[in-house]
Image (cartoon, rainbow, N blue to C red):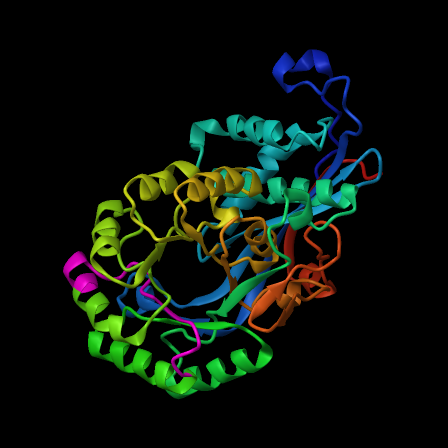
Amino acid sequence: MSTAAPTTPTTPAAVPAAFQAGEATQDRISWVRLSSVYLPLDTPISDAKVLTGRQKPMTEIAFLFAEIGTEGGHEGIGFSYSKRAGGPGQFAHAREVAPNLIGEDPSDIAKIWTKLVWAGASVGRSGLSTQAIAAIDVALWDLKAKRAGLPLAKLLGAHRDSVRCYNTSGGFLHTPVEQVLENATASLERGIGGIKIKVGHPDNAVDLSRVQAVREHIGDAVPLMVDANQQWDRPTAQRVGRALERFNLVWIEEPLDAYDAQGHAALAASLDTSIATGEMLTSVAEHWELIRHSAADIIQPDAPRIGGITPFLKLAALADHQHLQLAPHFAMEIHLHLAAAYPHEPWVEHFEWLEPLFNEHLEIRDGRMWVSSRPGLGFTLSEQAHAWTRESVEFGSRA
């Protein structure tokens, strides 16, 4: 574990007026801790990217946790993550820009986000650099909601107290179809509302056989989705998409390369089944390309990937303006709150993988995930998360 020397709070004279905390400031950030935590997966995970040779099976997930404290004794926690490469880079970038937080008003979240982005703008304003900032941004929103004594969804202005949820973790391509069926049953018995399975196998017939087996197993009334993880070209997506129509799917996810807005738009226009995509994009601007091309019926942003809650809210406003459905990717501990505050009935994705990291678990029943009464995001780090910590650094002093 490494510890940086305490950072002296920035004085107003040392920074431009636009970045100074004004007379209305009620509190100031005095302490920041960053932690690099690696979550091991019980079974190596394979989707279509593995079967087509683009990636190796996933064996762990790297998390960047940010904890922020103020002079008044308030604290917040947030996280970002990386699957496969990128975890050390996120931690390194966050460590470089985090000292800029000391002395700031924690309520000025949008201003702080901009300040941190420009602190590292030479390496870009999307991708790894903003994913590092995302952990800090989420922590600031958690702090703000805790300070108000409200769940984050209520601070944002909830449209509902629960969100439809579906399970993904039980339907990966490395899993034999018999086990996929057992996993689907277990998910539904737990109270989860829908089932998503992976497709994109090199043999399209295998995909269709697996989808048919799951549909017959869960029945016609249970929502079913599929996810191709960007593995089809346009002709294949068109052919397989048509073949999948008979299974009454809620959506076909990432049928094409994540940046192929025109191809996704053509599919969305030609198929009855909704097209969902967006999880691999790393900025609001990239998502805007999908929106302006009418490339998705259901948009799937990932708050940690696009820079945190602050940019997510900007994107949600754009999606709402176009009357798009919303189904945020992964990180249900964050996305439950954001989905609850979206005007149109959304979905949230259930993965049990992250549960060992936290002392609290989300309530799932009646096909929905429920917002708890706990303030902020409603979670604290477990002893197991601390045991999986490989590196941490602190700035400033804790109140």
Residue 141 visible to the viewer? yes
Q: Which residues are magenta?
A: 219-238
Number of marks present in the image shown = 0
Relative to 5, does residue 86 appear above or below in the rendering? Answer: below
Along the line of sight, the residue nearer the viewer: 298 or 3: 298
Kindly identify the residue that appears in the image at 80 percent across and 36 percent down. 397
Residue 2 visible to the viewer? no
Decide whether residue 307 is among the magenta residues. Answer: no
Drawn side of residue 139 relative to residue 24, left or right:
left
Which percent across, then down, holds residue 248? 32, 72
**To which quarter of the image does residue 290 belong?**
top left
Which percent across, then down, holds residue 351? 53, 67
Drawn side of residue 250 relative to residue 117, left or right:
left
Relative to 66, does residue 97 appear above or below in the rendering? Answer: above
Along the line of sight, the residue nearer the viewer: 87 or 306: 306
Which percent across, then down, holds residue 29? 75, 32
**To which quarter of the image does residue 292 belong?**
top left
Relative to 389, does residue 396 appear above or below in the rendering? Answer: above
Quarter of the figure with the C terminus: top right
Residue furthest to the left in view is 235
Kindly identify the residue that appears in the image at 80 percent across and 41 percent down. 74
Along the line of sight, the residue nearer the viewer: 98 or 207: 207
Kindly identify the residue that appears in the image at 28 percent across and 68 percent down. 200
Decide whether residue 220 is among the magenta residues. Answer: yes
Which percent across, then down, holds residue 267? 23, 56
